[in-house]
Image (spheres, grey):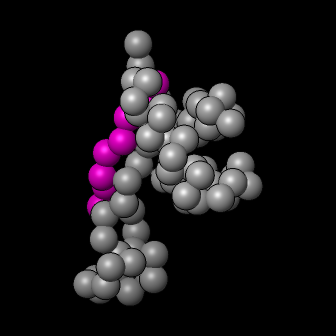
Amino acid sequence: MLSQILRYLKTHGEASASEIAIALKMDHQRTLTLLDELITKKRIEKYKTDKLPCPCGCRGCTTDSCSSIDIYKIIEV
C-alpha cells in the first residue's frame, strides 16, 4: 500500500489524505497511518493549506469544514 500511495503522489504531485483514500479505495484512518509511516521514513512531507476553495461553496464561512487541511507530497531528493 505504501508504494501505491507514493505512486499516486508522484502522479498527482500532492493530495489530501481524503483524496488518496478515495482514489485508492482505502479506509481513511488506514490512509493516515500509512501517510504517517511515509513521513517517518522521510519519503513524503505534510503541510497545511488554506488556499483551497471552501468545500461548502459559501466563500467565507467560519465552520470547521472550511479550515485548512493537511496536504501530502513527495520529498524531492
Pick the front one: 22 or 41: 41
Across and down, in percent, residue 60 comes to 28, 82
At horizontal 35% and vertical 75% (from top left) the residue drawn is 66
At horizontal 44% and vertical 82% (from top left) the residue drawn is 57
Is 39 in the magenta?
Answer: no
Residue furthest toward the right?
Answer: 25
Query: Image height check: is 3 above or below 58?
Result: above
Is 45 in the magenta?
Answer: yes
Pick the front one: 23 or 32: 32
At horizontal 71% and vertical 49% (from top left) the residue drawn is 24
Q: Where are the magenta residues, as a range?
A: 43-50
Relative horizontal placement of residue 76, taking residue 49 as reference (left or right) = right
Across and down, in percent, residue 36 comes to 44, 40
Across and down, in percent, residue 15 comes to 51, 48
Relative horizontal placement of residue 10, taking residue 54 as reference (left or right) = right
Q: Quadrant of residue 9?
A: top right
Query: How many labels, in total?
Result: 0
The reply to whether residue 25 is visible in this rendering is yes
Magenta: main secondary structure:
strand
Across and down, in percent, residue 35 comes to 49, 41
Q: Which quadrant: the N terminus?
A: top right
